[in-house]
């Protein structure tokens, strides 16, 4: 239980991140199908397959949301029981647990409605409102000592705007690729552009409205974790707005020059989805951080912050591990030497630990940059069939991190693999390494399919 309590924060962030992405796509689909696709007129060719595909995406995202929220509720219940000693009934009566279970039930109902050949519009919208309302119930707006109705309303509208914009993009991409009639593609593009513009305006307005009481003072933007995460989210939003502006320009060109201008939209929209997912994960981290307005103690001053961000060359000199003692161990850590448990005191790190971590973090960063360059070159076709295999470089990165991430654990250190997982820091490292490997395999499969499509198109020319 102690190990679980130690890694609960990270596990909760992952579960809520997955759930938030799934909720955005599910609610976006529940709004896109009745208001974007249903009004289309003209030939039915392509629309039947598009409807089937969009309903499948909606059902899948709703089921992922249901599972994610159920696991979040179970994890939170276990955390409350382990950290406070509460019994099961008391832990499950917590507001956050109730809202998570409500969201899971609503997501399951949404999947059931969307599975029908023609899901009722009213039911889709109503269940979307329940999902967004349940999510708003666990945000900062609802958890304040005196919840304000205006903040709750702003949070709800913020979530709806996010779903209508970012959540609708996957369905918009499918529409551009699967609709055979040019007029229908142009109509969908024009309609979705208007909805996106309204959603962006609402997203920015509600975000600014909530940030004023949440941040408190200008210093809170750079002296607190909440402020820094909010700044990162603002940068990602600015990047999304630039991509959206390019897409809007393409739609306006289409009205003037024909549908040829829409050819670049799917690629740009895919990039928009990727940046949007990162922004959502940043928002999840933001929701779990204490408000800047409530964080007054231990704030760094401007000189400390500027010193931290001083430019310096990467440290690539990996230190040699200290010699093993006679019993095969590497001597006591600062925590154990002081009489503490090495698994409980993660702040007591030796100069060797810090130097080792910095060096291999920099090696990994250079590896990521090199992989990105290979991916760019592969887009030009100069690598031939090898171009579709660049994601496998991330498998090599995962293997490298598995070996060097934790010098005291197997295979470099004396601590066995399963024994080392009791250390929350090592368990988090291993989980991140598994995610890197999983993403590498997913992207490899996507690149293989893209390569096959390009091959088929070139064979018919």
Image (spheres, helix red, strand yellow):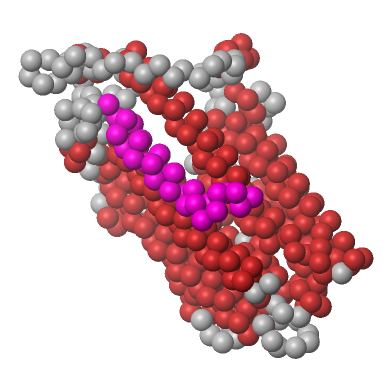
- Residue at 32 percent across and 46 percent down: it is 79
Helix, strand or loop for the magenta stretch, by majority: helix
Residue at the extreme left: 327
In the displayed structure, 198 sits above or below 380; it is below
* Frontmost residue, 98 versus 310: 310
- Nearest the camera: 21 or 395? 395
Above or below, 400 against 322 in this view is below
The C terminus sits in image quarter: bottom right
Residue in view at x 27 percent, y 26 percent: 407
- Residue 386: within the magenta? yes
- State left or right for residue 428 relative to residue 282: left
> Is residue 416 shown left or right of residue 174?
left
Give yes or no for residue 27 being in the magenta stretch. no
Residue 284 x %, y %: 53, 46
> What is the quadrant of the N terminus in the image?
top left
Quarter where residue 153 is shown: bottom right
- Residue 155 visible in this rendered orientation of the protein: no
Location of residue 215 in the rendering, given as x and y in whole percent from the top left corner? 64, 33
Task: Give the extent of the magenta segment.
Answer: 378-407
Query: Which one is in front, 79 or 264?
Result: 264
Q: Residue at x 79, y 52 (%)?
A: 246
Q: Is residue 316 left or right of residue 239?
A: left
Q: Position of residue 452 (x, y in %)?
A: 54, 66
* Residue at the image position 8 percent from the left and 15 percent from the top: 326
Q: Is residue 397 visible?
A: yes
């Amino acid at each position: 239980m102690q190990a679980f309590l130690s890694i609960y924060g990270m596990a909760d962030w992952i579960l809520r991140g997955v759930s938030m992405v799934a909720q955005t796509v599910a609610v976006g689909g529940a709004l896109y199908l009745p208001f974007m696709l249903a009004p289309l007129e003209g030939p039915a060719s392509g629309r039947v397959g598009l409807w089937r595909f969009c309903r499948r995406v909606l059902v899948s995202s709703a089921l992922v949301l249901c599972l994610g929220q159920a696991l979040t509720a179970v994890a939170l219940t276990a955390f409350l029981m382990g950290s406070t000693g509460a019994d099961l009934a008391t832990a499950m009566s917590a507001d956050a647990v109730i809202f998570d279970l409500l969201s899971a039930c609503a997501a399951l109902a949404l999947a059931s409605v969307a599975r029908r050949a023609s899901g009722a519009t009213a039911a889709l919208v109503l269940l979307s409102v329940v999902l967004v309302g349940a999510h708003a119930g666990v945000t900062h707006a609802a958890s304040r000592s005196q919840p304000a109705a205006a903040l709750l309303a702003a949070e709800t509208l913020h979530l709806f705007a996010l779903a209508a914009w970012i959540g609708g993009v996957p369905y918009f991409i499918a529409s551009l690729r699967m609709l055979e009639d040019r007029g229908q593609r142009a109509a969908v593009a024009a309609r979705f552009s208007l909805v996106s513009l309204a959603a962006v305006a609402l997203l920015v307005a509600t975000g600014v409205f909530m940030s004023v009481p949440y941040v408190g003072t200008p210093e809170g933007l750079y002296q607190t974790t909440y402020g820094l995460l909010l700044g990162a989210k603002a940068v990602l939003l600015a990047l999304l707005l630039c991509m959206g502006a390019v897409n809007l320009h393409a739609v306006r060109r289409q009205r003037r020059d024909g549908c040829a201008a829409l050819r670049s939209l799917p690629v740009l929209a895919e990039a928009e989805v990727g940046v949007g997912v990162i922004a959502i994960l940043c928002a999840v981290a933001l929701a779990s951080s204490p408000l800047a307005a409530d964080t007054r103690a231990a704030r760094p001053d401007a000189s400390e912050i500027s010193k931290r961000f001083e430019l310096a060359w990467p440290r690539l000199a990996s230190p040699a591990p200290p010699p093993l003692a006679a019993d095969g161990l590497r001597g006591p850590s600062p925590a154990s030497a002081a009489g503490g448990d090495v698994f409980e005191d993660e702040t007591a790190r030796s100069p060797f630990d810090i130097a080792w971590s910095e060096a291999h973090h920099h090696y990994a960063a250079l590896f990521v940059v090199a992989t990105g360059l290979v991916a760019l070159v592969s887009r030009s076709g100069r690598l031939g069939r090898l171009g579709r295999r660049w994601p496998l470089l991330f498998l090599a990165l995962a293997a490298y991190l598995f070996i060097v991430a934790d010098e005291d654990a197997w295979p470099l250190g004396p601590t066995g693999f399963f024994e080392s997982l009791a250390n929350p820091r090592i368990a988090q490292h291993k989980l991140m390494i598994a995610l890197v490997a999983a993403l590498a395999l997913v992207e490899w499969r996507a690149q293989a399919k893209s390569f096959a499509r390009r091959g088929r198109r070139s064979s018919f020319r």
